[in-house]
Amino acid sequence: MADPFLYMRSLQLQGLNRLVKVDVPVPVPRADEVLIRTKAATICTSDLHDIRSNPFGIQYPRVMGHEGAGVVVACGSDIMGYAPGTRVAAHPVVPCMTCDECKRGLEHLCSRMGHLGIDRDGCFAEYFVQRADRVRAIPDNISFPLGALLEPVAVCLEAISRSGDMNGKTVLVAGDGPFGNIIARLAQRAGAARVLVSGREHFRLQMIPGVEIVDTVKERSVDVAILAVSAASAVETCLQALRPRGRLVVFSTVQEPVALNLFNIHVSELEVVGACNDENKIDESLQCLTEESLALEDIITHHIPFDRWEEAFDLARNGHSRALKVALVFD
Ligand SMILES: [Zn+2]
Ligand SMILES: [Zn+2]
């Protein structure tokens, strides 16, 4: 058991636009948790939103970070499976297992959901704890930064799953950020015949192998459109690209209300579905991380030592012309 009186470096959100490096006590795992020494943690678009506008109502102060991998250093009293030293990746979502949604099997839509970096301290720290059922051992061929993509890839698998059968279909991915990039790769894996991607940054678009880069889709030619950008204007663009019986998957958060052309939805029998978190995609995600054809490690363009965190966040926020996913790495 790690000494509970030890302190560790962490990045704590103390208010809007106030992410601060502070020393805090090393957390102590509860009976059903493991304590992980962080080796890599990736910065998520949602971290940037949390810092700027706190849409999920984070109570300050809070250690941020929800995409992390590292090494088990201690286990709670109920946990047998992890020898200290086991290399692991963590999924940040902690379903309560007792609410109505959890009982329906929709644990990813839990009404009392816990989440690393939101209602409990996360992995932008030298150590973090997570409930053991949300942790997976990773093989040696998965690096720690790649392991940190366990949850981003899982949520992208949810977008694929909510799209229905992609085999032979034409899929439009609106958005060239880390999520758009992962989704476009997974759409090809799911058998899509054509994957079209729209976005603004040439650097990001050219990083996705095997796709067609498009500005706008003129005729109604798309079976599935996946919204992976939070611009409201992209919603109507996606809907207009859909052929009859096409489906729009709302993956990204669009903050402002959007006027939908329901006449179009009616006459073309379009479908609009959401994709949020992931329904038990954690093990399939782990599998994807090992698949060489997906080359998911390429998405991480920068590995920055933890102490240079300000540079890392600046790159994630403003470096769209040269950065995709930015990883903080720990020595
Ligand atoms: Zn994330
Ligand atoms: Zn629940």
Image (cartoon, rainbow, N blue to C red):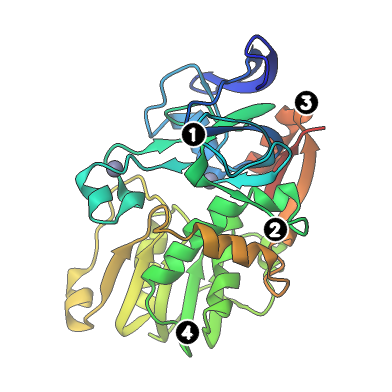
**Which residue position holds label 4?**
170
The amino acid marked with disc number 2 is: Ile
Residue for point 40% across, 50% down: 253
Residue 282 in the image: state x and y as whole percent. Answer: 51, 57
Left/right placement of residue 36 relative to residue 169 reads right
Report if the CB atoms under discs 1 and 2 are less than 8 Å apart.
no
- SS class of the residue under badge 2? helix
Task: Return the mark for residue 299.
Answer: 2
- Disc 1 or 3, which lies upstream in sequence? 1
**Which residue position holds label 1?**
78
Residue for point 59% across, 53% down: 150
Q: Is residue 181 visible?
A: no
Would you identify the image quadrant in which residue 55 lies? top left
The amino acid marked with disc number 1 is: Asp
Cα distance between the residues tagged 2 and 4: 23 Å
Q: Residue furthest right?
A: 331
- Disc 4 or 3, which lies upstream in sequence? 4
Mark 3 packing: few (<14 Cα in 10 Å), some, or many (20+)?
A: some
Q: Nearer the viewer, residue 125 or 244?
A: 125
- Camera-side mark, 1 or 2: 1
Cα distance between the residues tagged 1 and 2: 36 Å
**Which residue position holds label 3?**
307
Q: Is mark 4 within 8 Å of ligand 1?
A: no
- Disc 2 or 4, which lies upstream in sequence? 4
